[in-house]
């Protein structure tokens, strides 16, 4: 992904393309000569069933769903079609962190004039900030989100007489108690392979890694809030009270099942991972808000989530916007997202009805989604930049070395190195950087 995106960015003549590329192309829902046919690329499970619901009710606007590989692969596929000048779909699922890159590469339009002005009220400010650039420009309607939260083994906490940590200071104390009592157990791990998780943790602390003004970009990866987070986790790793192995490896998956990992800083989608890797621990885990830096002002970050945007090659923008709005804000579609696709919808209005029943793995916590909704409303704003891939790659490299060395100072230095690498790449790609 790094090479393909770099090539796409290099093709931009001036940095102002970020703000000008989003002008809506002409498109209507004229169906006098037959139905309007739209193509939609995405990867959400069973999305074709939800699209089928639309098609049955809307014979004049028919949507063909094409499942593509998620994440980087999807963005690369779209950028290739945009560069070729043909072959792109009308609608595209895009991870929030990929949106600035796609906009800068002239892949997504500003659809703000094609949707109802009240759409913003359906989403949290934090999620909405992920699809807006350059003021009121809108580059997609949020579909799902990944508000971060804390998962813990309630049975272990009960056995040890521990209280769920409400602050990060308390988290550090509990982590030490658990590891001192049983050196084989950890309250969590720091994963140097998950830049999105670290970004979400700095988001909770008040960081926003990029910002734009006019045609200029600013990078604040090495900000005071992010330094606080890096130093905190570096201190925990250096002391040895938490693990420092990457997540999603066979060893880490096993640790969820055998009780080595008794806590996990994750997101709303974590139950599926736990159920898949540790099915015998069902009913033993519970979820709580992330520990806080300021308990009086609850906040969280996002780890994951995506939106549906309209591509610059679409000639049917109005029809695409109509379907996009239905898909992500109607009671029918949002309900199916939960029941059929198993994802956490971004629309806060419809989520309350759609998420009445907890995930089966958490049947012991019937208020799971009620609590999740409260947490989701505290997501802080965060802006992604046009070279997220470079920043994330730098995270893997720099924090990988720091984690291996178990050095708190190394964590802080890794953050600065990420900043320098990201700024240098933006300048090399032709952007104006302040």
Image (spheres, helix red, strand yellow):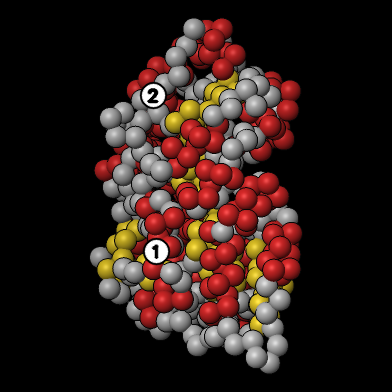
What quarter of the picture does the N terminus occupy? Answer: bottom right
Q: Residue at x 36, y 76 (%)?
A: 19
Secondary element at image label 2: loop
User: Quick one: label 1, few (<14), some, or many (20+) residues within 10 Å?
Assistant: few
Q: Quadrant of residue 31?
A: bottom right
Q: Nearer the viewer, residue 215 or 192?
A: 215
Q: Is residue 154 visible?
A: yes
Q: Nearer the viewer, mark 1 or mark 2?
A: 1
Q: Is residue 103 visible?
A: no
Q: Residue at x 73, y 64 (%)?
A: 52
How far separated are the C-alphas under marks 1 and 2? Answer: 35 Å
Q: Are marks 1 and 2 in contact (CB under 8 Å)?
A: no
Q: Position of residue 409 (x, y in %)?
A: 35, 35
Secondary element at image label 1: helix
Q: Nearer the viewer, residue 320 or 212?
A: 320
Mark 2 = which residue? Answer: 166
Residue 51 is left or right of residue 27, and the answer is right
User: Quick one: label 2, few (<14), some, or many (20+) residues within 10 Å?
Assistant: some
Q: Position of residue 286 (x, y in %)?
A: 56, 24
Q: Nearer the viewer, residue 20 or 188?
A: 20
Mark 1 = which residue? Answer: 118
Q: Is residue 294 above or below residue 332?
A: above
What quarter of the picture does the C terminus occupy? Answer: bottom left
| Res 422 label | none
């Amino acid at each position: 992904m790094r090479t393909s995106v770099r090539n796409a960015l290099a093709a931009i003549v001036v940095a102002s393309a970020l703000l000008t590329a989003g002008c809506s192309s002409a498109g209507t829902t004229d169906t006098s000569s037959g139905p309007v046919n739209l193509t939609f690329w995405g990867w959400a499970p069973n999305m074709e069933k939800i699209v089928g619901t639309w098609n049955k009710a809307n014979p004049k606007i028919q949507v063909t769903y094409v499942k593509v590989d998620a994440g980087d692969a999807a963005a690369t596929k779209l950028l290739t079609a945009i560069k070729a000048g043909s072959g792109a779909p009308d609608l595209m699922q895009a991870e929030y962190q990929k949106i600035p890159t796609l906009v800068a590469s002239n892949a997504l339009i500003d659809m703000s004039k094609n949707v109802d002005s009240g759409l913003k009220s359906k989403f949290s400010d934090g999620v909405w900030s992920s699809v807006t650039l350059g003021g009121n420009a809108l580059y997609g309607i949020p579909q799902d989100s990944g508000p971060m939260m804390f998962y813990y083994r309630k049975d272990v906490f009960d056995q040890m007489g521990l209280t769920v940590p409400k602050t990060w200071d308390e988290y550090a104390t509990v982590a030490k108690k658990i590891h001192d009592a049983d050196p084989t157990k950890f309250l969590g791990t720091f994963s140097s392979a998950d830049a999105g998780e670290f970004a979400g943790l700095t988001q909770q602390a008040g960081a926003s890694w990029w910002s734009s003004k006019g045609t200029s970009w600013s990078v604040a990866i090495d900000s005071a809030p992010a330094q606080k987070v890096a130093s905190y986790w570096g201190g925990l790793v250096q002391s040895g009270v938490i693990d420092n192995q990457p997540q999603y490896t066979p060893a880490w998956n096993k640790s969820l099942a055998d009780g080595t990992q008794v806590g996990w800083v994750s997101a709303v989608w974590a139950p599926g991972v736990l159920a898949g890797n540790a099915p015998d621990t069902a009913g033993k885990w519970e979820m709580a808000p992330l520990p806080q830096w300021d308990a009086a002002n609850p906040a969280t970050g996002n780890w994951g989530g995506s939106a549906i945007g309209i591509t610059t090659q679409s000639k049917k923008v109005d029809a695409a916007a109509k379907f996009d709005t239905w898909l992500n804000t109607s009671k029918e579609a949002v309900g199916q997202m939960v029941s059929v696709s198993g994802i956490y919808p971004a629309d806060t209005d419809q989520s309350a009805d759609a998420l009445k029943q907890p995930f089966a793995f958490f049947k012991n916590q019937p208020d799971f989604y009620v609590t999740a909704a409260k947490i989701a409303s505290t997501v802080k704003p965060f802006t992604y930049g046009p070279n997220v891939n470079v920043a994330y790659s730098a995270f893997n490299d720099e924090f990988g070395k720091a984690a291996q060395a178990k050095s708190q100072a190394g964590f802080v230095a890794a953050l600065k190195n990420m900043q320098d690498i990201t700024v240098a790449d933006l300048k090399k790609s032709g952007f104006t950087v302040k």
